[in-house]
Image: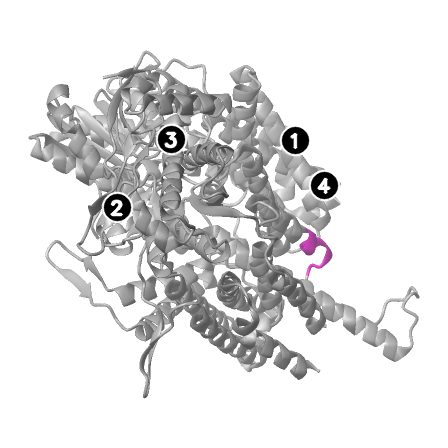
Amino acid sequence: MRRLATAAWLLVLVSAPLWLRSPYFLHVLIITGIFTIAAMSLNLLLGYTGQLSLGHVAFFGIGAYTSALMSLGFDIDLTDTFKLVVEPKPVALSFAVAIAASALFGWLIGRLSFKVRGAYFVIVSLSFAEVVRLVALNWVSLTQGPMALNNIPPVSVWLPGIGEYRFLGKVPNYYLMLAVAVVSYVVIARLVRSRAGRAMIALRENEALATSVGVDVTRYLVLATIVSAAMAGAAGALYAHYVRIVDPDIFLFIYTVTMVIMVVTGGKGTLAGPIVGGIIFGIVPQVLRDMAGPEVQWIIYGILMIVIVYFLPKGIVPALRDGLQRRRHVRDAGIDPLASAPPAEAAQRR
Amino acid sequence: MLFRLSSIVLAMTATAVLAGPALAQETIKIGVTEPLTGAFAASGNYVTQGARIAEDEINKAGGVLGKKIQLIVEDNKSNPTEAVATAEKLINSDKVPVMMGAWSSTLTLAVMPKLEEYKIPMLVETSSSDKITTSGNPYIFRISPTSGMEARAFTPLVKKLGIKKADFLATNNDFGLGASKAFSEMAKNAGVKIGVVETMDPNATDFSAQLAKIKASGGDTLFVTTAVEQITLILKQANDLQLKTRIITTGGSNAPDQLIEQAGAAANGSMHLVFFTPWFPDAVKNPEIAKKFVSIWNDKKYNVGGLTEGFRGWDGIYTIVAGIKAAGSADPAAITKALWNVKVKGINGDIAFIKQGPAGKESAQNVPSVYLVKIEGGKVVRD
Amino acid sequence: MVCKGRGPAPRDRGNPLEQLLQHGANALILGGTYALLGIGLTLIFGIMRVVNFTHGELYAFGAYMMYLWVMRLHVNFFVALLLAVALGVALGALIEYVLLRRLRSSDIDTTMLVMIGAWIAMQNTEQLIWSGVAQSISAPFPSQPLQIGHVYIGWDRLFVFVTALALIGLAYYLINRTKLGKAMRATFQDRETAMLMGIDVHLVNTATFAMGSGLAAAAGALLGPVFVVQPSMGDLASLKAFAIVILGGLGNITGATVGGFILAFMEELGAGYISSGFRDGMGFLVIILILIFRPTGLFAQKERIG
């Protein structure tokens, strides 16, 4: 049943450009997809290792800026006499460098989080994102500051026989995004089900206990941050080459909040959670665009977040899963669902 | 389970997407992208108000080509990426044949590649960066002056005001930096010594650091280029520091009435380069049109401080409509061609376009009038 | 790295000592309001262990209340100030009672998410009501600044400084000399034991959140007339408050006070001598540096557990 569902979904997604009437809506799907990839990466940190990073947008933005700068070429005055000049590089290479750069910063933050946990980590990650934003804003000679990096080239690959193929326009970028999304999903799924993944979950559930049985907590935390940051960086690079303009506002806290909302409402710690969250918070705003002003929409999201935390604290996907499980359990055991005794399920720790 | 929920979501969105657009009315759409929120919100709102006045007037007079015009206004949030998004939406979703925007030079520059990609003309009503008309984009029609033009118009005043040493304070984007560059070049050519050139973030509220440096530089004139909210704060803080230099604001987004209202006594003595003088409408080329606009604005009880910007929206819409009329259709290519030859009696003056930029891909530029006014005793006076 | 805005050589600049004194005066004045923000947040963060994202919104609320009472309803400036703070306290109590009380058993992540939701809802409500255009509040002070030697201080800023100091003093009194304050300190030291000793922890929570919010609203109400009022003004205030809390150590109000002044000085000197664009970045630099080199803050006696 599950395989069928996944296959059906994929079919729908892959064929979308054929039956979608409005190119604007395709644009919405692409942007939603990109943010969903970022949300999936945040889920790895937030959902599986339990570390709340509120600076996640920093990795997204670093990926975007790095890829943009590498593909446009840049120069930095290192001292009064020496100038570092980097010629424009092929986009595929820029993309790879962007992922590497994000991963590097992920590693740094991962190492830092070893010393600092919980609320303090939240603040450090927040500050990190703000500092990066201010650097992007003020280092005008490199990043163009508020004037934005313009005319970023689209992704292009060299295909044997065809030569250079540029991902220009909506349809090619849609498939590119889909490809990256699928790869990201698979990477996370594999990671989470592996030994490393189990270690991460152990870290989330009870760090002290995990350490005491010999799980190298730091190593897995750092691994999670690296993968998470790299993935967010990839999403950022996708964004840069699709929208083709990048400005420091990309580091605004509101984007981190969007990702957090997607993960939390969808269901942190589940694979499908960020996707459901992404769909809801990526597509619904566009559909509502003509019906309600942006402020009203955001007020609704704020309230929605509070309501979900209260009533569905684990998110939509786990709530549905539990609901269905309970029904199946009831059906299988012939229990009267209206009887008072609760089913004997293992008590959830969170 | 997941399948069921997501199917519902998909069905919902599919319905929204596949359902055709609302019953199409017979209107000619004009896309407007302005900053209604963010650092430039005040100005963006004024321009939009002016545009709406023009829309009402034109529709009351029967519209153009037998149809009414419909302004579709999108908020670009004072942010370049958002500006691009609004352009995408207006062009692809609303299918507008012509646009106006995007207020700030940075925002306009961000939108320009989209104009070329989709071949849609845009009327630039406020942006002042030279880059806009010299980048070789044939879909740009600008009615506002470039910083270069403004600086050139100012040249004779250097001697009249006796400027010996000038400092510059501008907002850290194309608008501000372009103005600082143009004015400092003009000053240098006129024999003025250049003091310090300071910048600030468009969202900053504390300029004590920059002003302290400017005070220490010892210049007699300070050229300030930014939006009205920051000018208010600069005037107040300059007063707090007892900065004695003469302050001249450029760029036309300086709304002197708002400065008087919000900066109070701190505004006295400051001078402002504006492109419309609602306080003395006889100074402009078409006083009747100017007076009518001012009276409609006041009837609607709009902020009187917004007149110096609102007129841009009015001039812009009237120019666009003249283009549509001359084109004889709502086809973007025809409008682009027709706009080159329009002659409009606008509030700022007479509007007509000359070629500017690299040969073969010129943009259109109007040569508007520039006026200098002073604030004295809580009122705006001529200088 | 090419820095912007380097003026002419020092010889041309006029008396550098005067400039330094001016920067010092500016920093001192700003520091008072920063201290208010910091004390408010460190109480909430320390006693309730809540990552309070609505702190900045209370700051903005205070400023908007001033705008409402002074500019729209033409109430006396000082009366409006009192009203703004009182309303801030009330709003804080309301938020705690409605949103946080039921979450007592939850972990820090959940409360934080609720706070984020509240923050988004509040800021957008403000934007919906007042629009995004920045507003000014007129203050009844002479526009000619006070002059001490070559240092100039606006009267409005002086008022802010004096009032901030008074409020800091009030906060100290409340925490250290009243029964409620004692209960708060006890809850901070050991929540379980405090409950066992019969302290009404619910009341302490509400009082803490109300007080913290009131201080934030006061900071906003004081600074609103000095600068401008816009819906997004709270965001930067929130982040700076967090910086101060980290500087001073969680729950440590002396630390928060000193931290507030230190941050103001770092900002002012950084903006004046290094780069004007990085003024607001100083706070975050501070956070990162402190957390790398001295994670417990400059003053905290209690060891921090995550």
- The magenta stretch is A307-313
Image point (55%, 16%), residue name: C74
Q: Position of residue A99 (x, y in %)?
A: 38, 70
Image: B50 above or below A343: above
Q: Which residue is mark 2?
A: B364
- Tag 2: residue type? Ala
Element under label 2?
A: strand
Marks 4 and 2, Cα distance to the nearest angstrom? Answer: 68 Å
Image: A231 above or below C108: below
Marks 2 and 1, Cα distance to the nearest angstrom? Answer: 58 Å
- Tag 3: residue type? Phe
Q: Which residue is mark 1?
A: C90
- Both marks 1 and 3 on one chain: no
Magenta segment, prevailing SS (helix, strand or loop): helix
Element under label 1?
A: helix
Q: Is residue C157 visible?
A: no
Q: Which residue is mark 3?
A: B311
Which of the two discs, 2 and 1, sits closer to the camera?
Answer: 2
